[in-house]
Image (tube, helix red, strand yellow):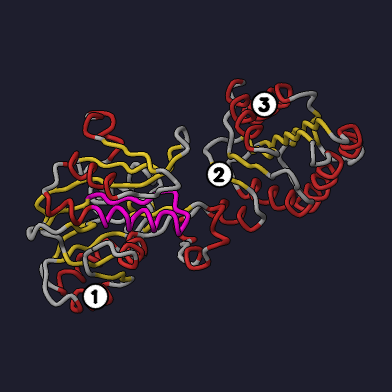
């Protein structure tokens, strides 16, 4: 789960990481009011959307007075911000962050994330702050430094000190850098984060370290432990289909294709998308109904797939282990009738009670195309889509 910068900045502050003073605003008048609480400028007004690259897209503007902050907020609020991360459809800006502008002398990059290969949390830092870290990794990989964090020891002072030296920080700056790293790691572990990022971490004119930008992502699987974090979710920033899927405890990611996929198991779902593409088709989604799908879950999955106007065929690929194929078949028939599914259904059932499941589908009277195996199902789904478009 992602949150806005103003929310991440509040978390940073609560964990002892210095951030610029400021607050969110939903109208130009609110932006002016926030600027007045800061007493003196200059100010920076930032679009609050779940995306990087906001400055390049016109979502970051500077102002010298509260009145000018209101004007800049008016220019940003309501605009559709298009960045590399939003895609061509962009995101509509509904809030801005108004904060005191930082007098930046130098900029650095700093983050904590999970390295799946190492199975450790890693500290990542770079003297090339203010730039997209992906671009730095591509053009100047020697400027990126990493440090594994031992889960038993946590972030140690010597690790932070060594990283500060690699960045070229002065002794006084390293002295600030050590507790900053420790506080970020405490936030990362206590709130079950998947990413904590500062870009840029600024050294201001007084030689103080300040998080001039704040980004925090959380592990969705741990949200049940953090009601305060879950309350920060902004449904306006999420795919409506993904938000609906969460209600049914479904793992769903929307894509751009036209073959809807309903699969049990993440690995099988990935393989299903791959084999669809190998036959020249394009998956409309990743959808894992899990190992204990109910008729209600299946109906929810159908409603989500059918809400996507691009879907022209649905491929149901089930390998029954703990999940029984007859239960899935009953759910498919019930949902297809209830929702009046008009697109072709291709169904492959294998595993526990597969024959019983196939019998239920065959006797349903619905327009269901049976598949002998995964490849057969993918080929038939692709053929049906191509036939519909011919």
Tell me the CA gap for discs 1 and 3.
Answer: 58 Å
- Identity of the residue drawn at 18% across and 75% down: 38
Is residue 64 visible in the rendered structure shown here? yes
194 is within the stretch colored magenta: yes
Residue 281 figure quarter: top right
Q: Which mark is residue 253?
A: 2
Q: How many labels were placed on the picture?
A: 3
Q: Residues within 10 Å of mark 1 (few under 14, many from 20)?
A: many
- When the figure is inspected, residue 271 is found, relative to residue 204, above or below; the finding is above
Residue named by callout 3: 387
Residue 87: in sight, yes or no? no
Q: Nearer the viewer, mark 2 or mark 3?
A: 2
In this rendering, position of residue 122 left or right of residue 34? right
- At numbered mark 3, what does the secondary structure look like: helix, strand or loop? helix
> Would you say 125 lies left or right of 350 here?
left
- Location of mark 1 (residue): 34
Circle 2: element type: strand
Residue 256 position within the rendered picture, expressed as x and y whole percent measured from the top left: 52, 38
Which residue appears at 46% of the width and 62% of the height? 234
Q: Are marks 2 and 1 in contact (CB under 8 Å)?
A: no
């Amino acid at each position: 789960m992602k949150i806005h910068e103003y929310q991440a900045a509040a978390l940073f502050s609560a964990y002892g990481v210095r951030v610029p003073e400021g607050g969110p605003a939903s109208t130009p008048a609110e932006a002016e009011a926030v600027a007045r609480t800061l007493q003196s400028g200059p100010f920076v007004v930032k679009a609050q959307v779940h995306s990087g690259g906001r400055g390049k897209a016109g979502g970051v503007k500077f102002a010298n007075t509260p009145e000018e902050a209101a004007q800049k907020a008016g220019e940003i609020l309501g605009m559709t911000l298009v960045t590399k991360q939003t895609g061509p459809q962009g995101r509509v800006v509904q809030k801005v962050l108004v904060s005191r502008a930082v007098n930046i002398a130098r900029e650095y990059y700093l983050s904590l994330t999970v390295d799946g290969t190492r199975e450790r949390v890693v500290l990542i830092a770079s003297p090339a702050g203010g730039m997209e870290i992906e671009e730095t990794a591509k053009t100047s990989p020697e400027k990126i430094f990493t440090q594994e964090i031992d889960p038993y020891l946590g972030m140690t002072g010597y690790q932070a000190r060594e990283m500060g030296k690699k960045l070229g920080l002065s002794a006084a700056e390293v002295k600030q850098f050590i507790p900053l790293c420790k506080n970020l790691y405490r936030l990362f572990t206590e709130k079950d984060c998947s990413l904590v990022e500062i870009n840029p971490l600024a050294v201001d004119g007084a030689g103080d370290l300040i998080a001039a930008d704040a980004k925090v992502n959380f592990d969705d699987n741990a949200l049940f432990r953090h009601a305060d974090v879950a309350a920060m979710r902004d449904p306006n920033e999420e795919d409506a289909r993904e938000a609906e899927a969460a209600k049914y405890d479904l793992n769903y990611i929307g894509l751009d294709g036209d073959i809807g996929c309903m699969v049990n198991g993440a690995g099988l779902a990935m393989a299903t998308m791959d084999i669809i593409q190998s036959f020249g088709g394009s998956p409309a989604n990743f959808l894992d109904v899990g190992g204990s799908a109910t008729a209600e879950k299946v109906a929810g999955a159908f409603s989500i797939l059918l809400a996507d106007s691009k879907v022209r065929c649905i491929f149901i690929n089930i390998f029954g282990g703990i999940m029984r194929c007859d239960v899935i078949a009953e759910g498919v028939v019930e949902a297809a009738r209830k929702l009046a599914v008009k697109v072709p259904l291709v169904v492959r059932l294998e595993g526990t009670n597969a024959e019983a499941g196939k019998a239920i589908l065959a006797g349903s009277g619905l327009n269901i195309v049976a598949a002998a195996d995964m490849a057969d199902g993918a080929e038939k789904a692709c053929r049906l889509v191509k036939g519909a478009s011919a």
